Amino acid sequence: MDPITPDEIGRRYNEIAHIFEQKRSLTIGVDYADKFLRLLVSHFKRPESCTVLDIGCGTGIPLTRRLASSGARVVGLDISSTMIEKARENVPNADFMIGDIVTTRFDIKFEGVFAWDSLFHLPLARQEEVIRKIVGWLDTDGVFLFTAGGDYGELVSEMFGKTFYYSSLSAEQYESILAEENCRVIIHEIDDPGSAGHRVICCRKN
């Protein structure tokens, strides 16, 4: 199965950005954003002293807005230019950039990285390297939360009439990678029993 190139993923999201914004649930993921923020604050105390990277921020609603409401400096990253335009309007107190997580580089450390329903668009062969790269951006005691599929493998599926590629490592592989990168898993659970295994993983870097 051939992955869809990042440029093509961005183009397809550009085409569905308007309906995506209209149909996006205002509640899905919010409870995990709150858990993420509580874990952040438990170590860093003052949210305004933290910088959080939101990978695959989309239109910014509701999750980027929730993260930014904590007082943390939030940097939203997305491959879709249209999604980023909407995010800048929806969350004016955050910073945004267009980019592909595979090739993006940062010279700063983040106290938190949040990646809700975004890393599953990575080619399967790039999953491990990108997870390791993201952990490398974390400051000591930094928190990383991301979602993954229920099983190892690849699939394609339609969303609003557009075909998208998805991939996931196994639960055991993610745990092993994080352990090797000196991260302690705090949350690893299926967030919705009806979701065919939609998995939430959150760790803290030691």
Image (spheres, rainbow, N blue to C red):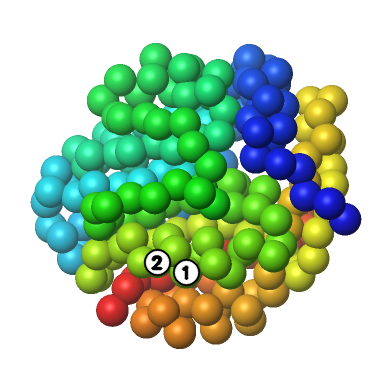
**Residue at left 28%, top 79%?**
206
Asked if residue 100 lies left or right of residue 139, the reply is right
For badge 1, the amino acid type reads Arg
Residue that carries the numbered disc 1 in the rendered image:
132
Residue 130 appearing in the image: yes
Seen in the image, is 42 located left or right of residue 84?
left
Q: Quadrant of residue 203?
A: bottom left
Q: Residue 15, position in %: x, y?
A: 70, 18
Q: Are marks 1 and 2 in contact (CB under 8 Å)?
A: yes
Number of other residues with Cα within 10 Å of mark 2, as a class: few under 14, some 14 to 19, many 20 or more: many
Quadrant location, the N terminus: bottom right
Residue 144 horizontal/vertical position (percent): 40, 61
Q: Which residue corresponds to the image point at 48% horizontal and 17% vertical from the top-left?
A: 86
Q: 10 Å neighbourhood of mark 1: few (<14), some, or many (≥20)? A: some
The answer to whether residue 55 is left or right of residue 12 is left
Residue 135: which disc? Answer: 2
Give the residue type that dot 2 points to. Answer: Val
**Residue 32 or 124: which is nearer the viewer?**
124
Determine the CA span between mark 1 and mark 2: 5 Å
Residue nearest the observer in this picture, 204 or 191: 204
